[in-house]
Image (cartoon, grey):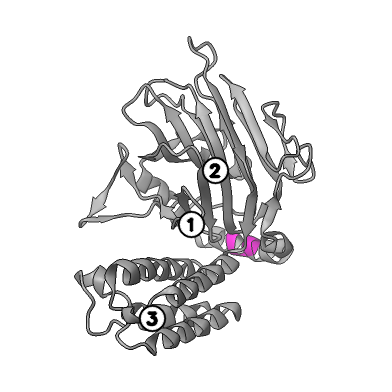
Amino acid sequence: MKRWEFMAYFFLKSPVETFKVLLATLFAVVSFSVTVDAAMYDDFADSGIDQNKWTFTSTGFTQPGDGYLHYSGNTPANEKLTSTMVFPSGVFTMPFADYSSNNNAPPGQGLGSVVALGLGSRDSGAWVRIERGQVLGTRVGQYIEVNWSFRISKDEWSKIYVNYVQSDITSGFLQLRYDGTNVTFYYRTLKTDPWTQMVITEGGQPVLVNGQTQPLVITPGWPTPIPMFIQALPGGAVGAPSSYTLSFKVDYVRINSFAAHVIHNLHNIIKEINKLNTDYFKNANQQNTLTNKLHAVVRKAKEGSYADALDKLQNDILQKTDGCSVKGKPDKNDWITDYDDGQNIVYPLIDEAISLLQGLI
């Protein structure tokens, strides 16, 4: 089953099944709202892995009390911490650091050494993960990768699908955004960097449609809330001639409600606009007017009026910041007239907020 067939497999549900999913999601929102609104799931500050938060049989994961979850292991381990709580939706973020591996396995054999953040389980019928991995026996070598797999029938599962880009970062952030239907995947190196969304790739290169990259969106079709997991795979396989080592540490795992994440993004746009020089605007007064418009969008989002917030953002605010993206230079409707330090910063943030709001409607 190809990637597009996988997407269609979950979109083409029967009306009865779709109704069941909606009921389950509604129940989950009511039952688990306290969970998803609590931003910090685990800061790993105490000594010993918290068994109230995680189930595990791992020996490679340790928590010495220095503020980090540590991992150190070697082939053929496959170790995982799975959250005891389940989630109907959310934005799941995990920073990792000090990634190190001696893996020099050949490509295309599922032998990579990875640190991963994932959602779902075999019990829920599908799982997804985003990971930092390494197989130095290939030209790709080091990468950020998205994997997913799903149950085809009672006893049959799909292959593990692969979508990757080259990356040799040893510290960074992994993030999954699950709006209750779709999962999208993001990564960045530093906290001050913008998030990079994973796009559909072939052989590590973006697939272009009409010259445009296509975001990678997975629709797992989970009928009930699902757990989160942290996974460590040193790579290789049982009986392999080489044994690979893997080590890394995790600072924390944060889980924000999807709505809270949207509001945070909107506040971030306001902050960035306030930082701009007034000379970057067609009229100096437009800086305050634009932030006031965004405050109005924030209020609508907090009220749950997501469609109204989206309409304001998409059909009013975006039009004042998009000339450089659409035409390569500011147009007559633009309020922000600087490209490099103005529209180039603000426009992608507004575009991301629009995408997030669409996920709430």
Element at label 2: strand
- Identity of the residue drawn at 25% across and 75% down: 323
Q: Are the residues flagged by discs 2 and 3 in contact, CB closer than 8 Å?
A: no
Taking the image as shown, residue 109 lies to the left or right of residue 303, namely left
In the depicted structure, whether residue 165 falls above or below residue 321: above
Q: Earlier in the sequence, mark 2 or mark 1?
A: 2
Say what secondary structure mark 1 lies in.
loop
Q: Nearer the viewer, mark 2 or mark 3?
A: 3
**Residue 286 is one of the magenta-drawn residues:** no
Q: Main secondary structure of the magenta part?
A: helix
Residue at 51% across, 54% down: 191
* Residue on which disc 1 sits: 192
Where does the image place residue 166, in percent across and percent down from the top left? 36, 38
- Of residue 110 and residue 226, the one placed in the foreground of this image is 110
From the image, state whether disc 2 or disc 1 is nearer to you. Answer: 1
Q: What separation in Å lies between label 1 and label 3 (alpha carbons)?
A: 24 Å
Q: Determine which quarter of the picture holds residue 314.
A: bottom left
Residue 36 to residue 346: above or below: above
Name the residue carrying label 3: 317
The residue singled out by tag 2 in the image is 127
Amino acid found under the numbered disc labelled 3 = Ile
Is 231 left or right of 281, judged from the image as shown? right
Pointer 2 or 3: first along the chain: 2
120 sits to left or right of 332: right
Mark 2 is surrounded, within 10 Å at the Cα level, by few (under 14), some (14 to 19) or many (20 or more) other residues, namely many
Look at the image and give the residue range highlighted in magenta. 21-25
Count of labels shown? 3
Quadrant of the rendering where the N terminus is positioned? top left
Name the amino acid, label 1: Thr
The amino acid on which the numbered mark 2 sits, given as a three-letter code, is Trp
